Amino acid sequence: MPIPPETDRLAFREWTTADLDEFHAICCDPQAMQFVADGAPWGRERTGQFLDRNFAAAADLGFCLWTLIDTTDDRLIGYCGFIDSDSAPEIGWRLAPEYWGRGLATEGARQVVRFGFDSLGFDRIIATVQSANLASLRVVEKLGMRRIETYERHGREVLLFELTKSDSVA
Ligand SMILES: CC(C)(COP(=O)(O)OP(=O)(O)OC[C@H]1O[C@@H](n2cnc3c(N)ncnc32)[C@H](O)[C@@H]1OP(=O)(O)O)[C@@H](O)C(=O)NCCC(=O)NCCS
């Protein structure tokens, strides 16, 4: 599977079963999960299902939510990539809280957007963000994404954004 090239501080790679413990440390953290679906931290089984879905996506679609690796120490610090959705590939991200506030999500997402348009042949990318998730809203803003719809899910307001290939990649 082709993988986005490294950035200044981040590498991308496919998931392995050995990632479960390190990734689960993020998924069981209430702060990290506050704006994901209903906001409940995941149990280990749910984290395992996430890995399984990404193994299948990588094999079947040629893309997934790739792991984000800190190139200074090779630590898995989160993910950034795409999931398949009805209307267009959807970009997603999640980082361990100790890495927040350094511009890493934006750095990773810009590379993933570029890779989606230039190497995977996407014409359009979407993102969904809960309206209370101010950090993610800022990331989509920095990516130059346009808000196109608002709906409710899990009793929370969700904003739908899009970016097309003809838009300039920020
Ligand atoms: C969303 C997330 C990936 C952002 O990661 P990050 O590496 O800190 O993001 P960046 O540093 O690239 O950019 C965040 C921006 O949001 C801003 N920000 C962060 N918290 C904020 C807040 N509470 N209010 C307003 N802006 C905020 C930062 O200042 C920064 O903007 P700036 O570059 O203009 O200063 C991270 O918070 C995360 O993993 N959250 C939990 C999982 C999650 O919510 N995933 C997304 C589901 S849609």
Image (cartoon, helix red, strand yellow):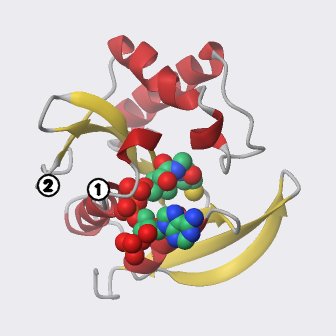
Of label 1 and label 2, which has the lower sequence position?
2
Residue 103 point in image, percent of width and height: 31, 62
Q: Is residue 162 above or below residue 21?
A: below
Label ID, residue 108: 1
- Circle 2 crowding by C-alpha within 10 Å: few under 14, some 14–19, many from 20: some
Q: Is residue 69 above or below residue 43?
A: below
Asked if one can make out residue 144 in the rendered structure from this viewpoint, the answer is: yes
**Does label 1 point to a residue whose CB lies under 8 Å from ligand 1?**
yes
- Quadrant holding the N terminus: top left
Residue 85 point in image, percent of width and height: 58, 55
Callout 2 amino acid = Thr
Callout 1 amino acid = Gly
Label ID, residue 52: none
Q: Are marks 1 and 2 in contact (CB under 8 Å)?
A: yes
Residue 166 lies left or right of residue 1; in this view the side is right
Taking the spot 78% from the left edge, 44% from the top edge, the residue there is 38
Please name whichever residue, 47 or 125, is drawn nearer the observer in this view of the structure: 47
The residue identified by callout 2 is: 7
Residue 94 lies left or right of residue 80; in this view the side is right
